């Protein structure tokens, strides 16, 4: 068993893939699901990176945060916006986003459409720090 | 300038992204375009990986090859098949493929549809070796 495989997409995710839902009342994030597709924890130790998929429900958003590691993102579903520093830009499928180290960022879905994106990060990385709207740690 | 940015998709790729076309008559590969989106050579040195997009034209295919590094792939456009070892499986958008180290593999587009996929690899990696249909180096 080499480990090579096709992980087919299903209507609500991927078969045998860990999915973790967030729904939070304190305003940091709202209606976000993370699917760790490849490279999580002990899985696929040959990869120097972790390959994840996030889906933000209509009207939802990820936490406004920053960290020393960078993000490589491709939008694959729906519409929304990304905040990078003080800039907010609309995004749609196949748009690519580079979040540089220490950049304050947030992903937000459109009011009527979910926003799905691949997000790749280094396996070895620091923990995110949630910041307030001004960009400072609370 | 932090380097953070949205790279918007265009009708034929991405603005300011290096795209390299292959069209080869010796049968190793046919009608494949590679777009190095993030992490190529001197770009985004903070990433431990390279984030690329490949598009195989209708009826085209990538070389049948193997290497010590693994691939993390998500199909984002069209239809086709992936060969992993001796297995060939149909793939479509949002399907994820893990190509384990040393696995012989090939991506092939459907006869009437192109096949577009994200393919992430470690920044530090070995060179692919093209193999013949039986899996041996020619």
Image: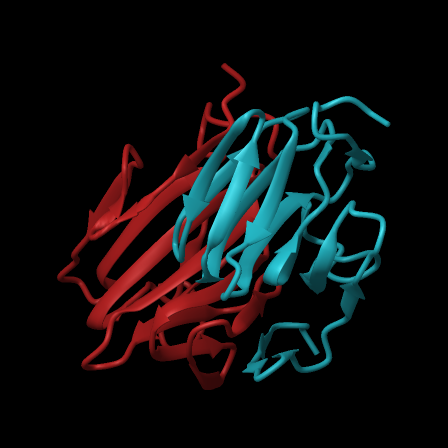
Chain colours: A red, B cyan
- Residue A126 is left or right of residue B40, and the answer is left
- Residue B20 is left or right of residue B133, and the answer is right
Horizontal and vertical percent position of residue B16: 73, 80
Residue A126 seen in this snapshot: no
Residue situated in front as seen by the camera: A49 or A86? A49
Horizontal and vertical percent position of residue B84: 55, 31
Question: Of all residues shown, which one is farthest toward the left?
Answer: A25
Q: Going 56% across and 25% down the picture, which residue do you hit?
A: B86
Q: Going 79% across and 66% down the picture, which residue do you hit?
A: B20
Horizontal and vertical percent position of residue B24: 82, 57
Horizontal and vertical percent position of residue B102: 68, 24
Q: Going 78% across and 66% down the picture, which residue do you hit?
A: B21
- Residue A24 is left or right of residue A123, and the answer is left
Q: Is residue B95 positioned above or below B40 on the image?
A: above
Q: Is residue A61 positioned above or below A46 on the image?
A: below
Residue B116 seen in this snapshot: yes
């Amino acid at each position: 068993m080499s480990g090579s495989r096709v992980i087919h997409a299903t209507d609500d995710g991927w078969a045998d893939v860990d999915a973790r839902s967030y729904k939070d009342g304190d305003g940091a994030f709202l209606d976000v699901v993370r699917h760790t597709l490849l490279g999580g924890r002990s899985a696929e130790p040959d990869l120097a990176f972790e390959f994840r998929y996030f889906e933000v429900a209509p009207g939802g958003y990820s936490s406004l945060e920053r960290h020393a590691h960078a993000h490589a993102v491709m939008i694959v579903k729906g519409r929304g916006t990304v905040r990078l520093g003080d800039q907010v830009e609309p995004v749609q499928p196949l748009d690519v986003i580079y979040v540089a180290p220490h950049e304050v960022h947030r992903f937000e879905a459109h009011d009527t459409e979910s926003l799905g994106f691949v997000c790749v990060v280094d396996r070895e990385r620091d923990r995110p720090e949630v910041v307030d709207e001004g960009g400072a740690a609370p």
